Amino acid sequence: MLEVSNISVTYGQHHALSDAALHVERGEIIVILGANGAGKSSLLKAIAGLLPSPAKIVKLAGRDLSRLPPHEIVEAGLALVPEGRGVFGELTVAENLLLGANPKRARAVEAEQRAKVMTLFPRLGERLAQTVRTMSGGEQQMVAIGRALMSNPEILLLDEPSLGLSPLLVRELFAALRKVRETGVGLLLVEQNARESLAIADRGYLIENGKITGSGTAAALQSDDAVRRAYLGGLASGAA
C-alpha cells in the first residue's frame, strides 16, 4: 500500500536521516522505535511532504507521490497527525473536523467519516460545540486524530500521539487505534511508549542515528533482548 525508500533529510550540515525505507500494508499498524533525535519525526514529515528529501520515493497504492506538495499528498490518501497535535484551538470540535473533510476525496463521504470518528471517540460527539483550547490534552489528541480521519485517508501517520497523556488515556488512545486499523486504514506510528505500541502493532522498525537498523514482527521485537533493554525496561525475554 505505502512504499517508501531513499528518504534522506539534512538540517544544514546535520544528516538527520539517511536512505530510510519501509512499507505499510492496508489495515496494518507499523511502529517506528528510536531514541529522541534518531530521525523518527523527520521521517514522517518527509513522507508527508513537509520536509525536503530530493531523492525520496513515496508510493501509495502504486501512485508516485514523491514530488507532490503536502496538500496533494493528503488528497491522495495520506494524512499526518503531527507531534503536538496541531489543532485549531480557537475553533470548536465540529469546526476542526469540518476542516479535515476539505479534500475532494473526503467531501462525498463526510457524513460517513464523521460517524466513524464519533464511534471511535464518543466524547467528541458530546462536545462538538466546545472550543478546542478548553479541552484536556487527551481530548485534543482525539480531535487531531479525528480531523485526520475526516480526510478519508488510506494511510495515517501519527507522531508521538501518546505524548503527555495519562496512563488511562494512553490505553484509550491505543484501543481507538486498533479500531482504526479494523476499518482498513494503515497506520505508521512513531512512539516513545514502546510497550503499548508494540502491543497493538503488526510490525516495527528500529531507527538509530538517522538510519533504519532493524525490523521485524511486533512479537519478534518484543522478545529481542536488545530491544527489550533499549525500549522495554530491560526485562528478560519471557518476563511478565
Image (cartoon, helix red, strand yellow):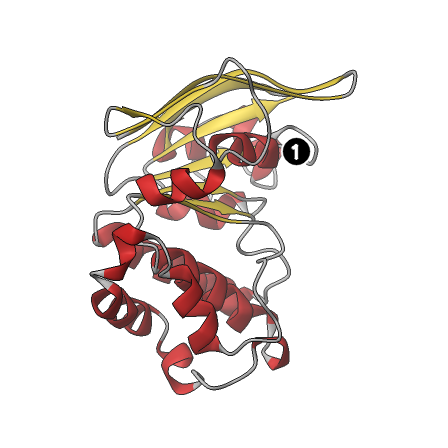
Residue 138, picture quadrant: bottom right
* Residue 201, percent from left and from top: 36, 42
Q: Is residue 190 left or right of residue 109?
A: right
Quarter of the image for the N terminus: give it. top left
* Residue 173, percent from left and from top: 44, 62
Tag count: 1
The residue shown at (41%, 56%) is 148
Q: Secondary structure at mark 1?
A: loop
Instruction: Using the image as rendered, state which of residue 39 and residue 10 is in the foreground.
Output: 10
Reply above or below: 156 against 34: below
Outermost residue on the right side: it is: 13
Q: Amino acid at mark 1?
A: Ala
Q: Which residue position holds label 1?
A: 35
Q: Is residue 136 left or right of residue 158?
A: right
Residue 3, picture quadrant: top left
* Residue 101, percent from left and from top: 35, 61
Disc 1 packing (10 Å; few <14; some 14–19; many ≥20): some
Residue 218, picture quadrant: top left
Residue 107 appears in the picture as rendered? yes
Reply above or below: 47 against 92: above
The residue shown at (56%, 25%) is 207
Residue 240 appears in the picture as rendered? no
* Residue 233, percent from left and from top: 61, 41
Instruction: Using the image as rendered, state which of residue 125 and residue 111 is in the foreground.
Output: 111
Instruction: Using the image as rendered, state which of residue 44 and residue 101 is in the foreground.
Output: 101
The residue shown at (55%, 56%) is 162
Q: Is residue 46 left or right of residue 118?
A: right
